Image (tube, helix red, strand yellow):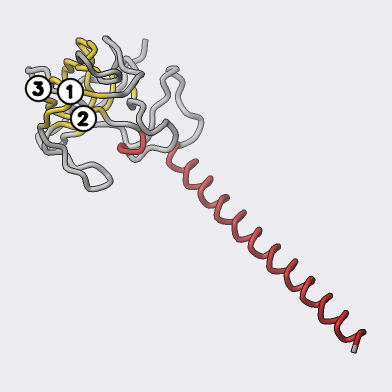
Amino acid sequence: PRTRVSRMADADELICCGLVLECEAVPNKDKLKRLTVDVGSGTPLTIVTNASNVDVGKKLVVARVGATLRDGTEVTKAVVGGVVSEGMVCDAPMCGWIGGGAGAAALLPDDYVVGAAKPSARPRLDGKAPTESVVDDAAAREAAKLKEKEEKKAALAAKRAARDAAKAAKKAEEA
């Protein structure tokens, strides 16, 4: 099997790959789970999450205490559901990735190195390499959306102009 090459996280890289070692329900809380996560630092972290797609053995993106997320939120140690949480399980939007739902843990392939910095784009979990850059593909999709939006605006403006011209012609006939 191929091995994903990735450098290990520097001290400043607080958003990294974690491996779920334990996963148990938080007592008296319907959706919360208490995870024990190895982030390659020697001491596993306790993290509380409501992400439903986490389980023992899965690799996911974790934000450690001190990390700043894309929306400017700084991750701090907090009590969640009565349990001290030493980080946060990230979802795709928090990672800045295209695809993947908000609230679902951003999962990583099994061959990703524990403690490695998160990838800049959402990796495929089926082991296949993308045929083209995910980032370039996302930029192309965004450009296509903008072009389509502009074309719709132009078509609507032309339709309004034709309607206004027809009204003006009708008024001219009546006068």
The amino acid type found where label 3 is placed reads Ser
Query: Mark 1 highlights which residue?
Result: 47
Q: Earlier in the sequence, mark 3 or mark 1?
A: 3
- Dot 1 lies on which element? strand
From the viewer's side, name the closer residue of 114 and 172: 172
The amino acid type found where label 1 is placed reads Ile
**Dots 2 and 1: beta carbons under 8 Å?**
yes
Query: Mark 2 highlights which residue?
Result: 88
Displayed quadrant of residue 146: bottom right
Q: Earlier in the sequence, mark 3 or mark 2?
A: 3
Displayed quadrant of residue 125: top left
Residue 3, percent across and down?
Answer: 31, 16
Query: Mark 3 highlights which residue?
Result: 41
Is residue 129 placed above or below 3 in the rendered structure? below
- Dot 2 lies on which element? strand
Q: Residue at x 34, y 23 (%)?
A: 107
The amino acid type found where label 2 is placed reads Met
Quadrant of the frame with the C terminus: bottom right
Q: Residue at x 22, y 10 (%)?
A: 24
Tally of numbered tags: 3
Q: Earlier in the sequence, mark 2 or mark 1?
A: 1
- Dot 3 lies on which element? loop
Q: Nearer the viewer, mark 3 or mark 2?
A: 2
Distance between the alpha carbons at the discs numbered 3 and 1: 15 Å
Residue 27's disc number? none
Distance between the alpha carbons at the discs numbered 2 and 1: 6 Å
